[in-house]
Image: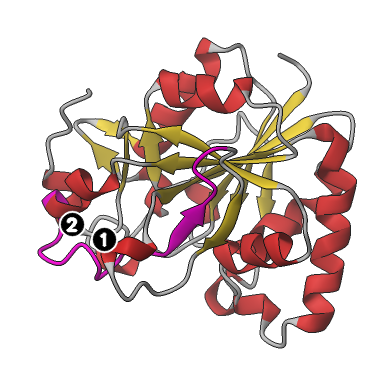
Amino acid sequence: MENVKIFILCAGEGKRLRPYTEHQPKCLVSYLGKPLLQYQVEVFEQFNLKNITLIGGYRNDALPRQYPVVVNNEFAITNMLYSLFCAEEHMTDDSDVIISYGDIIYHASVLEKLLQSKDPCSVVTDIDWRRYWQERMEDPLKDAETFRWDTQTHRIFELGKKPKTLEDIQGQYIGLFKVSSTHVKAFKQHYEMFKSSYLNYRNAYMTDFLQYLIEQDFPVFGVPIRNHWAEFDTVNDLKIKLAWM
């Protein structure tokens, strides 16, 4: 699959993962003896996906150089969306674009479902999220975000906001999505519009931009999965034994 470009976001400091991030970015923190980044790369390799760009910031000197590294030099005062668009010139409309957070891992079946999606923007969505969240924290609402979609078509109409009740969460965005080559140009154009309308765009979250796309009638659809992934925000996340591994 040479018509897929992958961008892994590795710029964050990972302060909640200290001391493991004292001298390296989050994506290089080890889980069960292997860096998080290596888990992702090995899954991509199963599908012969080799066009990988790392977007670094904090301790980017530690990132492996067998892949191109784009650096967000303002990582300390910006957020993930800004980091992604530091690599904007590498996003071309001759290839699908996969964006993956650097602090997650996932089973090959998750990536396979994403690759099979033909929607303009496909967002991997865990519809069985509560089971995993209950392992990670006492209150599932504490860190979860709203996610609402049409249960028949899977078109998303809200994500990334603070939920009031569990009914506001029909699934959970995991930090992995794909933009079809047919919509890469529009994806970048919408970012330019977002910058002019979102006062603090430099600190915007990825979900802020995805919600903006939804409100602009850009077609954003969910790709439903049941677990088979994990994210690593805190030291406690490193202690959880994942049943699917």
Compared to 129, does 72 lie above or below? Answer: below
Horizontal side, residue 92 vs residue 144: left or right: right
Q: Residue at x 67, y 66 (%)?
A: 82
Q: Amino acid at mark 1?
A: Leu
Q: Which residue is mark 1?
A: 17
Mark 1 secondary-structure assignment = helix
Q: Residues within 10 Å of mark 2 (few under 14, many from 20)?
A: few
Separation of marks 2 and 1 at Cα, in angstroms: 5 Å
- The answer to which image quadrant residue 66 occupies is top right
How many marks the image carries: the answer is 2
Q: Amino acid at mark 2?
A: Val
Quadrant of the rendering where the C terminus is positioned: top left
Of residues 32 and 205, which is closer to you in this image? Answer: 205
Residues in magenta, as a range? 135-152
Residue 167 position, x and y percent, is 32, 62
Residue 32 position, x and y percent, is 19, 32
Quadrant of the rendering where the N terminus is positioned: top right
Compared to 52, does 183 lie above or below? Answer: below
